[in-house]
Amino acid sequence: MKKTLSLLPSLCRSLVAAAALAATLLPAAAQAQSWPAKQPIRLVAVFPPGGSVDQVARILAPVLQQRLGQNVVVDNKGGASGSIGTGAVAASAPDGYTYAVVFDTHGVNPSLIPSLPFDTKRDLSAVSLIGTGAMVITTVADSPYKTFGDVVTGSRGGKSISYGSIGSGSLGHLALTMLAKSGQMDLVHVPYRGGGPLMNDAIAGHVPLAIGSVFLSKPHIDSKRLRALAVTTSQRSANLPDVPTVAESGFAGFDAPAWWAVLAPAKTPPDIVKRMNEEINAALKLPEVAQKLAAQGIIVNTGTPAAAQAFIEAQVDTWAKVVKANNIKAD
């Protein structure tokens, strides 16, 4: 009898601990079950209106609204390479009603902006990798560079070639920095404040080379004012099927895609993240959605939150090495 009585305090403590754990899980479970009836869902596009991030958010919003039976609004919150809007989402309540729509700068910002007010890996959870797309290296139509091989040859032996990107620390800047180092090329970076100024100077021939997204560059390629030399993805772009990849141009294995993703605050209930991922995947499988994204140069992805998280963390690690090795600073 004494032995049985001596076990009671331990048993009571176990029951109390189990009850406490259940109590903490109940609100999250109830929240997931009632979601999204409470209020409208906000997609924070972390760049200003008109760009690809804004377009992705506005393509997804009406379809998600229809599928979820809840208003879905797009809120543009740009600045600091997308980190201002992303930080606002990281600080939001993890209740499933606020998401960030981000661009590939999200993977570069942790190494480029040391004063970020959030931890990219710990304070945000990936919901979905929307898709990837090629960047394209272009030159003005009457340029002497007919192929990317001409650029390689022209940037060796004490000669240099300048190229423009949408800004210091942009993925285009980092990709060509990595490429120049591996190919022993002397490529001189000229940063622009956005795609508009970059394209204006590229078309005028003020900068010999430019690197930008297919969405940014293709209209000028179609109008014959720019010549496409290579794309940065491992496979050719469906939007530019005749343009070889950098890998085909002598740099085997090279792959530097642009990408878009949806993120949630880190402690958002897993059931809500899973449901949102499923609804986004369903939207991406609709032909009209896939076609609209394809027009932006985006190949859709319908993976899991875990796969999206792994992809983003790999991007953060890859570009951190390039930033550190080349002492790259933000504008």
Image (spheres, grey):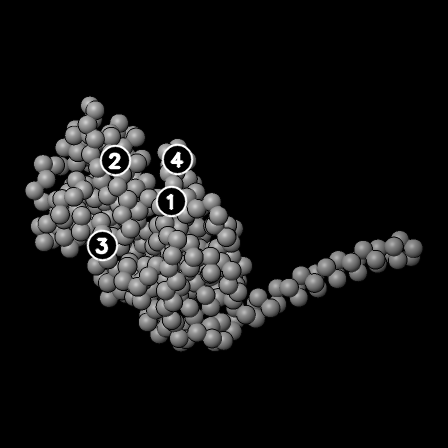
Task: Give the residue type at disc 4.
Answer: Asn
**CA gap, disc 1 to disc 4?**
10 Å
User: Given the image, on which type of amino acid does mark 1 rest?
Assistant: Ala
Give the class, few, some or many, for how many residues have Cα within 10 Å of label 4's Cα (few <14, many ≥20).
Answer: few
Left or right for 238, reference 128 = left
Whether residue 326 is visible: yes
Give the numbered dot on residue 330. Answer: 1
Q: Which residue is mark 3?
A: 196
Horizontal side of 5 relative to 202 (left or right) equals: right
**Whole-Å distance between the Cαs marked 3 and 2?**
20 Å
Whether residue 311 appears in this view of the structure is no
Q: Crowdedness of circle 3 by 10 Å Cα count: few (<14), some, many (20+)? A: few
Residue name at image x 17 percent, y 36 percent? 148
Residue 112 is labelled as none
Question: Dot 2 lies on which element?
Answer: strand
Q: Is residue 318 left or right of residue 229?
A: right
Give the residue at x 38% y 71%: 73
Tag 4 and tag 2, C-beta contact below 8 Å:
no
Q: Does the CB distance between marks 2 and 1 fall below 8 Å?
A: no
User: Label 3 is placed on what type of residue?
Assistant: Gly
Is residue 236 placed above or below 93 in the rendered structure? above
Give the crowd class for mark 2: few <14, some 14-19, many >=20 residues within 10 Å. some
**Residue 226, position in %: x, y?**
12, 47
Tell me the SS state at disc 3: helix
Residue of label 4: 327
The image's mark for residue 188 is 2
Question: Of label 3 and label 2, which has the lower sequence position?
Answer: 2
Q: The residue under label 2 is which amino acid type?
A: Val
User: What is the CA distance from the residue labelled 4 to the residue labelled 2?
Assistant: 14 Å
